[in-house]
Amino acid sequence: MVEHEKTSVMDWISVAVGRVTMLLIAAMVLVMAYEIMMRYVFESATIWATELSLWMAGFVFLFSGLYAMQQRAHIRIFVLYDLMPRSLQRVCDLISTALIVAFAVAIVWGGYNEARDKLLRWETFGTAFDPPIPATLKPLVLLIICLVAVQAVTNLICDWSKDKEFHNPADDLED
């Protein structure tokens, strides 16, 4: 699959985050492989590998959402969308972007105090390794959802003047 074009600063940020996500996945695999080797070959399990993998998986989950938005890889019902004239497609794009922005505002509005509190008291996971998973992931959720909303608005602006596109389900199949 070819990456979507990068037409704005926000696109470049999202793609850079996507690259970091790819590296995090590789690092997570290495940490898990190390844990497996230590546990089953040397019979000396680590106290940190599982929680570090969990922590990295949280970052991967959040970062991949931003990259997916930039790539326009989010869910869209093309069967209906392709039947619409371009003017109605633009209305649908506007509505979906407005809903994404409203969702982001609601998440930030409802989660800001908790995320701030977890960050300021540097809340940890409460285990032997005790990483600051809540202190880092809670605020990151708010940051990433804001970036996703900005990326959605950027996509709307960049795609507004484009001609009507038709989507072939066969294009999504790997060769």
Image (spheres, rainbow, N blue to C red):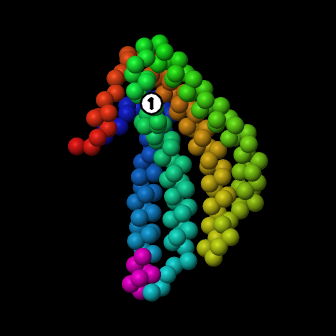
Residue 169, by quadrant, is top left
Residue 163, by quadrant, is top left
Q: Residue at x 37, y 33 (%)?
A: 4
* Residue 167 falls within the magenta-colored stretch: no
Name the spot of residue 48 as percent of width and height, x first.
Answer: 55, 73
Q: Nearer the viewer, residue 105 or 154?
A: 105
Secondary structure category for the residue under label 1? loop
Residue 129 versus residue 148 in the image, above or below? below
Q: Nearer the viewer, residue 122 or 160?
A: 160
Name the spot of residue 139 as percent of width and height, x first.
Answer: 66, 50
**Lateral position of residue 119 relative to residue 89, left or right:** right
Residue 165 versus residue 26 in the image, above or below? above
Name the spot of residue 137 as percent of width and height, x first.
Answer: 62, 54
Image quadrant containing the N terminus: top left
| Residue stretch rendered in magenta on the structure | 36-42
Residue 36 shows in this picture: yes
Q: Residue at x 36, y 21 (%)?
A: 165
Helix, strand or loop for the magenta stretch, by majority: helix
Residue 46 versus residue 17 in the image, above or below? below
Q: Residue at x 45, y 57 (%)?
A: 24
Q: Residue at x 41, y 64 (%)?
A: 29
Mark 1 lies on residue: 77
**How would you rate the neighbour count of disc 1 (Cα within 10 Å): few for under 14, some for 14-19, many for 20 or more?**
few
Name the spot of residue 175 as percent of width and height, x first.
Answer: 22, 43
- Report the number of discs: 1
Residue type at mark 1: give it.
Ile
**Lateral position of residue 108 relative to residue 87, left or right:** right
- Farthest residue, direction bottom: 43
